[in-house]
Image (cartoon, rainbow, N blue to C red):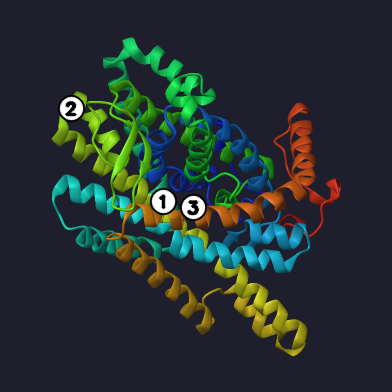
Amino acid sequence: MVKLLFGGSGKDKKAPGISSFQAFSMALSGRVGTGNIVGVATAIGFGGPGAIVWMWVIAFFGAGSAFVESTLAQIYKENHNGQFRGGPAYYIENGLRSPFFGGLFAVIAAIAFGILLPTVQSNNIAISCSHSFGVPMWSVGLFVAALIALIIIGGVKRISNVAQVVAPVMAAIYIILSVVVLLVNWQIVPDVFMEMLRGAVGVNEVSGALIGSTIAWGVKRGIYSNEAGQGSGAIISAAAKVSHPVKQGLVQSFSVYIDTLLVCTATAMMILACKTYNIIESVGNDGSVSYLLRNPGAPAGEPGVFYTTEALGTIVGAHASSIIIAIALFFFAFTTLMTYYYYAETNLVYLFNRWRRRIYKKHPERLDELEHADMHFGDDRREKLVIWALRIGIIVSVIVSSVQSGDFVWKLGDIGVGVMAWINLVAILLLSPQAFRTLKDYERQKKAGKDPEFHPRDLGINHSEYWDTPEE
C-alpha cells in the first residue's frame, strides 16, 4: 500500500488525472476531520473507552469496503473536460445498469456533501476557535467561508495541491504530539489498553451498563470518521491516474487505517491516559447531564473537543493546549470542507451528463451540441449556474452552521452519512465479484513480474468507458 502511494500513471502517460498520492491526500483530508478529535471524545463520553475498540473493528471492515468501492470507481471512471470523474453514481449506473439509483445517489450525495456534512466541520471550527481565541463564532464562520471560497473556485487541481501538503503534515504533527503525551504517561498505557478491551465487551460495572451504547457509538463515530462504505473515498479514487484499478483500491484502504488506527487512536489514548473524560448516562432537555462515571480532571457537561484539550493541557498547559487543538481542528476540518465540495461537484457533473443523454435520446439531432458540452464542462450556462449555486450553498452552510448547537449539526451529519451508506453498500456488495476478479488479475500480473495493466474485457467487465477506449 505504501509503495503504491507514489506509483503512477494510467494506460496513457498523457492521460488527465491526479497522482495516487494526491488522491490519497484528498481522501485523507475527507477522512481526517472533526471525527478524529471531537468524534472520538463524543464516542468515549457516551460509549466509554470500549467504543474505541469498536471503532477499530469498523475500520477493519471499512478498509475492505474502501478497497471495493475505490477499485470500482477506477473501473467505471469517465473523462470529463480533462478530469477523471467517477464514484458510486457512475458504477451504479454502468456496473449495475441502474440509472435511477445512480441518479438517486448523486442527488443525495450533492445535498449531503454540499449542505449537511459541512455543518459539523464548520461548527466545530467555530466552537474551538471561539473558545481558544475569544472571537465570536459568527466571525470564525465568515473567515472559514471566505477561505474555502478562494480554494474551491480553483477546482480539483488546487484542492489536491493544498490537500497533499496540509493533510499529511497536520496528521503527522498531531500524532507526534499524542506520542509525547503518552510517553509522559507511559506507565499507565498498558492499563488504558486493558480498559478499552474490557469496556468493549462490558466486563465491568460501568461498561456492562452501556454495552449497547459502546458498540453503537464506536460504530457510528468510526463510520463518520473514516467514511468507508459511504462512497466518498470512491469519488476521489476515480480522479487518480493509475495503470490498474487495484492500485488505487489498496491506497484508499491504507487511508482508512491511517485515519482510525493512528489519528483516532492517538486522540483516544491521550484522553484515556490523562483521564480527562466522563461517561455520560443521559442529557436532559434543559441541558443537565447525569454521569455514570465522573473523573475529577474532566470538564463538566457534554463531551467534545474539551476532553482532548484538557488531555494535551496536562503537558503544555491549558492555554497552549487550547490553541494547539484549535489550530489542528481548523486544518483537519478545513481540508475536509475542501474535499466535500469536490464530492458534491462530481455528483452534479454526473447529473448533468445524465440529463444530456436523456435529451439526446429524445432529440438525436442535438448530438453535436451535447458532445461539445460534455467535452467542455462549464460552457453550458445552466451548468455554470448550478455549480455556482453549489459553491454559494456550501459557503452559506459554513456560515450558518458556525452558530448552531453541536447536537443539531451532528444529527445532520449522521443523516447524510447514513443515507449514502445504505445505497452504496448495497451497490458494492452486488458489484464485489468484479472487484475481486480485478484483484486476482492484479495479483496474477504481479506474480509474473509485470507492472499490472488493466484490460476489462479480458475479465468479462463491460461498460468501462475509459479503459475500453484505445490509446492514441
Asked if residue 385 lies left or right of residue 461, the reply is left
Label 2 Cα crowd, 10 Å radius (few <14 / some 14-19 / many 20+): some
Secondary structure at badge 1 equals: helix
Q: Position of residue 443 (x, y in %)?
A: 75, 32
Name the amino acid, label 3. Answer: Asp
Reading the chain from its start, which is encountered first: label 2 or label 1? 2
Name the amino acid, label 2. Answer: Val
Picture residue at 48% right of the left edge, 60% below the top = 113
Secondary structure at badge 3 equals: helix
Reading the chain from its start, which is encountered first: label 1 or label 3? 1
Secondary structure at badge 2 equals: helix
| Most distant residue in the top direction | 187
60 or 70: nearer the eye? Answer: 60
Picture residue at 20% right of the left edge, 24% below the top = 315
Asked if residue 328 lies left or right of residue 243, the reply is left
Q: Which residue is mark 3?
A: 414
Question: Which disc number belongs to residue 316?
Answer: 2
- State which quarter of the image contains the N terminus: top right
The answer to whether marks 2 and 3 mark residues whose Cβ atoms lie closer than 8 Å is no
Is 301 rendered above or below residue 201?
below
Label 1 Cα crowd, 10 Å radius (few <14 / some 14-19 / many 20+): many
Asked if residue 149 lies left or right of residue 411, the reply is left
Circle count: 3
Is 367 rendered above or below residue 245?
below
Separation (CA) of disc 1 from disc 3: 16 Å
Q: Position of residue 425 (x, y in %)?
A: 67, 49
Separation (CA) of disc 2 from disc 3: 34 Å
Q: Which residue is mark 1?
A: 336
Q: Position of residue 248 (x, y in %)?
A: 61, 43
